[in-house]
C-alpha cells in the first residue's frame, strides 16, 4: 500500500505532534512504506508561511532538502479528476490531494473529516 500525506499530517509528523494518530505515526516512521508528499502541500505551506499564518523553523526549502518522503508532482490527470469530485470540501488544496490520491490509488492520511468523506465515496 502507498500513502499520501495531507498537509497537516506532514507538519504534525515533523513536530511529532500528539494530534498525529498512532497508526499514522507508525506508517510515517516505517521506512519500508512508500509515503508521498504532494507538491500541492508544499505550495500550501509556502503560501501560509508568506501570509504569516504558519511559522516554520527551519524554512521550507531546508525541510525539503532532508525530506524522507517522495514528492508527488501535479499531473493534468489529477487536475481533471477534480471535476468529478462532489463539492464536499471547498479548500482547493485539499480537493487536489483527494484527486491525487484517487488518481494514483494512494491512501490519503488525514484527520480532516471533510476529506475523509471523499474517501468513503464509491467510484462512479
Image (cartoon, grey):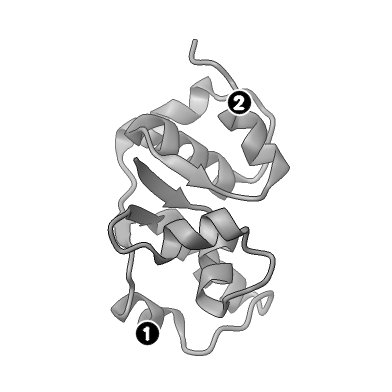
Does residue 44 sit above or below 104 in this rendering?
Answer: below
Position in image of residue 3 (x %, y %): 40, 47
Q: Are marks 2 and 1 in contact (CB under 8 Å)?
A: no
Alpha carbons under labels 2 and 1: distance apart:
35 Å
Name the residue located 56 percent from the left edge and 25 percent from the top edge. Answer: 85
Q: Which mark is on residue 62?
A: 1
The secondary structure type at the circle numbered 2 is loop
Given residues 98 and 33, the one toward you in this image is: 33
Identify the residue shown where x is 33% and y is 35%: 104
Residue at position x 64%, y 46% from top?
Answer: 91
Residue 107: percent from left, percent from top: 45, 40
Q: What residue is disc 2 on?
A: 120
Q: Is residue 88 above or below residue 40?
A: above
Quadrant (top left, top right, bottom left, bottom right) of the N terminus: top left
Q: Is residue 117 left or right of residue 93?
A: right
Judged from the image, the secondary structure of the residue bearing numbered disc 1 is helix
x and y percent of residue 113 in the render? 71, 41
Amino acid at each position: 500500500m502507498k500513502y499520501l500525506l495531507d498537509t497537516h499530517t506532514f507538519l504534525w509528523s515533523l513536530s511529532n505532534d500528539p494530534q498525529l494518530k498512532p497508526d499514522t505515526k507508525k506508517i510515517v516512521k516505517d521506512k519500508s512504506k512508500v509515503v508521498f508528499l504532494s507538491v500541492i502541500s508544499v505550495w500550501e505551506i509556502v503560501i501560509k508561511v508568506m501570509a504569516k499564518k504558519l511559522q516554520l523553523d527551519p524554512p521550507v526549502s531546508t525541510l525539503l532538502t532532508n525530506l524522507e518522503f517522495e514528492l508527488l508532482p501535479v499531473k493534468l490527470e489529477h487536475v481533471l479528476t477534480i471535476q468529478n469530485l462532489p463539492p464536499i470540501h471547498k479548500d482547493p488544496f485539499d480537493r487536489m490531494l483527494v484527486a491525487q490520491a484517487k488518481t494514483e490509488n494512494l491512501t490519503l492520511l488525514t484527520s480532516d473529516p471533510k476529506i475523509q468523506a471523499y474517501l468513503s465515496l464509491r467510484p462512479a
